[in-house]
Amino acid sequence: MTQATPLSALSPDDEIIALHDRLSVLRRDIVRDAALHMSDWRPALQDGDFLKSADNLAHYLALRRSDLSTLQPHLQRLGLSTLGRCEPHVLASLDAVLAALDCLQGERGAAFPRPSDFSTGSAALLQRQANIFGSDPDGPHTRIMVTLPSEAAFDGGLIPALIARGADCVRINCAHDGERAWAAMIAITRRAAKEQGRDVRVAMDLPGPKIRIREVQAEPEARLLPGDRFLIVPSLGARGRLPQITLSHAELLPHLTPGAQLAIDDGKLGARVVARDSDAITVQATHTRSKGLKLKPEKGVNLPGAELAIPALTEDDLSHLDFVAANADIVGYSFVQTPDDVRQLATELGRRMHGRPLPALMLKVETPMAVRNLPRLLVQAGALMPVAVMIARGDLAVEIGFERLSEIQEEILWLCEAAHVPVVWATQVLETLVKEGAATRAETTDAAMSQRAECVMLNKGPHLAEAVGFLDGVLRRMDRHQMKKSSRLAALGSWDGPQHLQVEQERPAEETAA
């Protein structure tokens, strides 16, 4: 089989013909592969509102199986779309390029897509954003979600202040407080939103099977440093002088074989299993902060790279569902990994809705399995109820690695845009400002990047209201310059223009009119 001639070696006319041929073959392959995706998804989809979005997602997945980076410079040189912003309308973008190449070859009557083929997907995404996170015509494009602290239940001024600063959605973490406190938070939120004329939604996060340290047996001030060892045990007991911990999920213990990696407290402590017997698992710290780390109850435990078959919906979650179904606009689903997880939650919610529509489902992507299954999760959830995705960067970074996170968070944004599904940008957004009252430069840049999502989440802290106002300002500024992956060419005022332009701009309006 002869190798295709490089496009750069062709004459301009032959380059156009070759580009058209290659993109035509690409389109044929995309349509074929997308049909296979849709065939797999069809049992879940039926004929619901999500069907067109799933179809576009299928075409996007098929498109991104190919490396188009070598074709893009040639398309750019011809003044054509490089397909780099095709997420909401894959086939329309490709067909427009093919039609333009037809015109460049002198063909008349080239079949360009209709303008509506480019607007329908983006309009669906905007509508779903408004349906799930509320509508605020006077606010920035990206909605602001705030995590409520326990004191929000009895501090009557906290939630109104957050809403006044720009909060569009309040988040209640069902791992903390209880139904009495949650009811108070929701009542204050509904009342404040009505008084301020705002559309504010309530999200309630189910705790899920978060693996945590349950009990600790160690010297009170003991800190682990690299090389130090501790034991993971079924129950605390007399086993020498090494620190001991128990875990919240006994299902994890069989996975802790020699060589297995652990990350504790969002990766602040890295460790490796070095030995195990019937009574204890010996673990050695591999890295910590310079001052070491104390083992404490309730700190999270991750097994990076391990795929754990732990049900996403726990007995604790089920105990909360009656209240959540009656009060939440959005249900956050922690550690969801499979379509079966989605179906189970939808079924349990349906039993409690008494004929009312299901609330929106916020899929929290926190594990490698959830990343890999994301297209199937979107399709299954989208077929059953309104759906959004949270990029839960805390656990996700620990699970896949911090370097990989920088890439994956972008891929999730692209994939969800192709499915016309809103995204929540979460974890440590403006964390130093929220907790200490001053943002770092890196946090400010991260906040600006969050504008490409449909919602951004702030965690709780003493300066939360100030952080909401700061974030609102950052998002408004970025709205002038960016919409998803597209740059918006708003006028820039940071640099002086030619002197005669400045004189014209500074002349009084009546003089200009004269």
Image: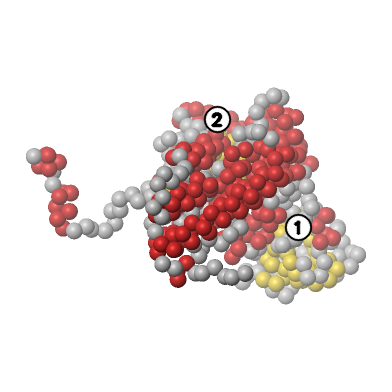
Which disc is residue 189 wearing?
none
Percent from the top left, x then y, of residue 399? 67, 60
Front residue of 202/295: it is 202
Q: Residue at x 75, y 34 (%)?
A: 348
Query: Three-letter amino acid code at disc 1?
Result: Glu
List the residue tagged with mark 1: 307
- Residue sitting farthest toward the bottom: 227
Query: Three-letter amino acid code at disc 2?
Result: Arg
Within 10 angstroms of label 1, few (less than 14), some, or many (20 or more) residues? few
Percent from the top left, x then y, of residue 125? 53, 40
Asked where in the image residue 333 lies, by quadrant, the reply is: top right
Front residue of 139/389: it is 389
Check the image and report above or below for 446 versus 132. below
Q: Residue at x 50, y 27 (%)?
A: 194
Which disc is residue 190 wearing?
2
Mark in front: 1 vs 2? 1
Q: Residue at x 62, y 38 (%)?
A: 51
Tag 2, which secondary structure? helix
Count of residue discs = 2
